[in-house]
Image (spheres, coloured by chain):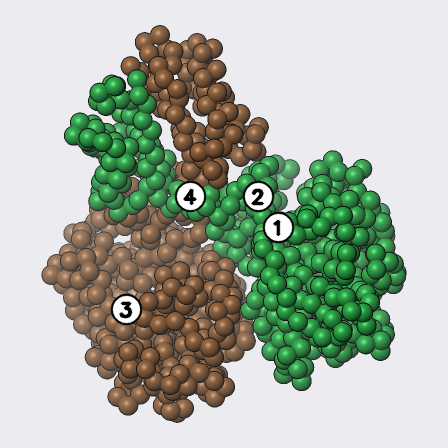
Chain colours: A brown, B green
Amino acid sequence: MSSKKLKVIPIGGLGEVGKNMMLYEYGENILIVDTGMMFPENDMLGIDYIIPDFEYVRERKDIVRGIVFTHGHQDHIGAVSHIVEEISAPLYATPLTRGLIEVKLSEDKLLNKANLNTIHAGDEFNVGPFKVEAFHVCHSIPDTVGLGITSPAGLVVHASDYKFDPTPVDGWPTDFAKLADFSGRGVLALLADSTNADQAGWTPSEKMLDGALDKIFQDAPGRIIIASFASLVSRMKQVAEAAERHGRKMAFVGYSMRQNSDMAHELGYLNIPSHVLVDLNEALNLPPQDVVLMATGSQGEPYSIMGRLSRGTNRRFDLLDDDTIVLSSHTIPGNEESVYQTINRLFQRGANVVYAPLSHIHVSGHAKQDEMKLMINLVKPKHLIPVHGELRHMKQHAILAEESGFPGENIAVVENGQVIEFKDGEMTIGERIPGGYVFVDGVRVGDIGPSVVREREALAQEGVVTISIVLNHKARLQTEPEISSRGFVYKHGDSDIIEETKKKVIELVKKTEGDIHNQVVKSIRSFLYSKTKKRPIVLVTISWV
Amino acid sequence: MSSKKLKVIPIGGLGEVGKNMMLYEYGENILIVDTGMMFPENDMLGIDYIIPDFEYVRERKDIVRGIVFTHGHQDHIGAVSHIVEEISAPLYATPLTRGLIEVKLSEDKLLNKANLNTIHAGDEFNVGPFKVEAFHVCHSIPDTVGLGITSPAGLVVHASDYKFDPTPVDGWPTDFAKLADFSGRGVLALLADSTNADQAGWTPSEKMLDGALDKIFQDAPGRIIIASFASLVSRMKQVAEAAERHGRKMAFVGYSMRQNSDMAHELGYLNIPSHVLVDLNEALNLPPQDVVLMATGSQGEPYSIMGRLSRGTNRRFDLLDDDTIVLSSHTIPGNEESVYQTINRLFQRGANVVYAPLSHIHVSGHAKQDEMKLMINLVKPKHLIPVHGELRHMKQHAILAEESGFPGENIAVVENGQVIEFKDGEMTIGERIPGGYVFVDGVRVGDIGPSVVREREALAQEGVVTISIVLNHKARLQTEPEISSRGFVYKHGDSDIIEETKKKVIELVKKTEGDIHNQVVKSIRSFLYSKTKKRPIVLVTISWV
């Protein structure tokens, strides 16, 4: 053991700890694992997406030795362009993950700037003083790896997102042997996925879905349209296999589905027989009962294929009678309302919709309680750091571990920014580094903070009324005040309340001595509240002529 | 059978069919069942609540013979004041439902105007030509009734919200005998709850919760705080019984919990022994391990007790170490994000939080699939009209019925406003009456429509920039333009973009011939988009001096 400290630092993300970015710092060396983004919560109005606040890394960019990616989901790679713009360390990723990173970097014209290196599960490579061993884990995207990270302080197992599917669609189960090998060498700490820590049992195998798909393929009188995530390559394969079993042709619909299926095909992760796969045009000209389409939009996004089909605004094709639509996905928390609205609209337009819990047409990509216990028993770490979950999940992960006999004092449930230090085999909780997450709003990164979002919230709830006043040098009105509004009254033009507001402003200016601006804001606010019980934002501008 | 038609009309509500208001019209007679309200969906910005658009009833108010209420939930009684203001027909409700209606009418100073009549399960009474038989059903609020409605056209069973709990907490199961009696007399149509039509099996009995509560009471090292719905009187009783078994004192926290428990006590629906029930002050002075509190806030509402405790802003008391918080409720779709945020905050402040699926501490108030089939088998209706659900639920209800051999052509899945007609024992689908639902926004009822909500959506996503221009008679600037914004830039005062906008406006006015207003709106919009990739609402006012 070294006398230097190993610092483990989850960097800011939204709610979930260490999911978007994790730092390992040993002496003057930093290893970054993942650089992801998050989508905003419903009350973060107008925000496009969220990235970790990586000021801590920015200040230490010269000691960043490398960035290793565990898998290609947006919450693990989505901020890569923001990082590559500022930090020039080499990137390491498995082939599919690398492909998805290249797509992002190309879009942002940063591909030339990035030093990308391909790794494979089973590889061992050095990043500064860190020896990194990538090992395969099952997850809802192929080519996911966990990492054994050895520094002079000891071996840390970074399990990232994983599950123990005994019969995954790609036939490649989680690498038990490597986990046992780690355990034999002695593991200082395990960092592992907490996403499903409040779910009892074991996540069912992907294999289980074949039966549900068979039933749907048997029963569907016409076309089948399956909505899922564009990164869920195993689901593409299962649908293709079901299509083959039931004599249907399959086509992918939409840019991201086509792009990802093409990439998975090129890289050898998806092999659909050519007599099954057709392009969309061909599929649309076949008899409906011979076709299955696969598209995005399982979250009810209004501009996705599903969103447009549900509103009758899809350009290439419309719903047909006897279409069967299958939502082969889970609903991301916060999206429930839009998913249900989309389902109702699809029914309204005559489709039959199959969704959970009506059919078992999705399984999670994350371990459940019994798998979490198995992971702990396999790896036998000295310390446990639950990660990849909201606080409630990590607390449950800790409770599960304690129930299985893990000593509570060796578990660290922390929030983003909390430094965990290891020295001489002991874990201590260090400082909390400042920062959290950064809003990306249009092209502006970090310029828009909570105060602007609060203003948007007020605009959203109450609307806005603007009052333009022109005063002469005697502080008297030079012309009539102009009143305008949005989100407040229906027929602005012939609204009584706008007319009354104008009269009120004229009166106020007449009688006010002193701060006219403040007086008008205050009085008109309370006038509008008394009339409507709403508190629109009142914006007053005064021009002096 | 009469030659007159019976019309059955579900009146507008949000998404769910016939839940808020249902009409039975026979000749020149209307019977109304329930007058409820709905809470807005997340994208209905600023709207306080929603009521049915009852224009159809308003136009026929002289032939409304009575309004019968099935139970006291807000989605069945919440619009009563709006109705009573305009329609003077007698109201009929069971004692608890009447009590809750009286609270609403008192708040709106309408109690004197209402002709309220108490009914009991088992009663038979006439409303115009309709013979109404109220029968007890189990639901998540006591004193719920279904209605047998006999007109010359036949007997319609309005089952409303129900479940078949064999061991309800109040010992009063659903009235099987009456359902069998109806069946013997021949039922023209059954209207029944579809809420849980996508849930397999049978809703567990409330009795089942006792075990989960016992485990929580045994394990909790300190105070227990149970969050639930203020109308869930059976849960109050179960918590009181658990408190007695485990030697704790119980107190209700918050206005609605105290009001409803007091009313339930006075009316005989809730009898908590005096050695168990204490007031909050006393509870706060007892040792924590001797106390259980019951409060609202299970939906993560920011200003509820739970919301305030999670933020450390509750006035009367704060969280203690070792507090156990129990969310004994389900999450209403759309509230998931705020519920999870609240749970995370409670954990962050040191409490242990028990919530589904970690413990079985809630059961639904609605029938599941097997109960729906049982209802159909008991009542043996000729026709089935699934109600009380979104379209997806009613479609499933229909599928379930067909699976159990019910003829598909005798099932009507309709949306709000769709008239269903019965004549000579046959069902036909009639016209669709106009109207949907009405937004209540502050004191304004129906003045705010979708267009104002869309403006609020734009304000919420993009913010607003206002530009005041003062022009002289030569259409030249008399003074500098004033620019203001909300929800668009952080530091408005020293923002480059606002300064640049001002310069741009000055240039534009200089060079524009013709419609200055339009030119400024158009050019500034595209200028701001090019700079920020955001499209704030640009409000330009021009004053001529």
How would you rate the neighbour count of disc 1 (Cα within 10 Å): few for under 14, some for 14-19, many for 20 or more?
many
Chain ID for label 2? B
Task: Locate residue A456, reporting x and y percent.
Answer: 41, 41
**Mark positioned earlier in the residue sequence (4 or 2):** 2
What separation in Å lies between label 3 and label 4 (alpha carbons)?
31 Å
Closest to the camera, between mark 1 and mark 3, is 1
* The C terminus of chain B: image quadrant: top left
Q: Is residue B386 above or below residue B269?
A: below
Q: Nearer the viewer, mark 4 or mark 2?
A: 2
Left or right: residue A384 compared with residue B517:
right
Of labels 2 and 3, the one closer to you: 2
Q: Which residue is mark 2?
A: B446
Image position, residue B431 (x, y; %): 61, 63
Q: Which comes sooner in the sequence, label 1 or label 2?
A: 1
Q: Is the residue under label 3 in contact with that under label 1 (CB below 8 Å)?
A: no
Q: Identify the residue under disc 1.
A: B53
The local secondary structure at tag 1 comes to: loop
Q: Amino acid at mark 2?
A: Gly
The CA distance from mark 4 to mark 2 is: 16 Å
Q: Position of residue B169 (x, y in %)?
A: 78, 63
- Between the C-alphas of marks 1 and 2, the distance is 9 Å
Circle 2 packing at 10 Å, graded few (<14), some (14-19), many (20+), is some
Query: Residue most toward the top?
Result: A474
Q: Are marks 4 and 2 on the same chain?
A: yes
Residue at which label 4 appears: B455
- Distance from disc 4 to disc 1, alpha carbons, whole Å, reads 22 Å
- Tell if the residue under mark 3 belongs to the same chain as the one under mark 4: no
Q: Are marks 4 and 1 in contact (CB under 8 Å)?
A: no
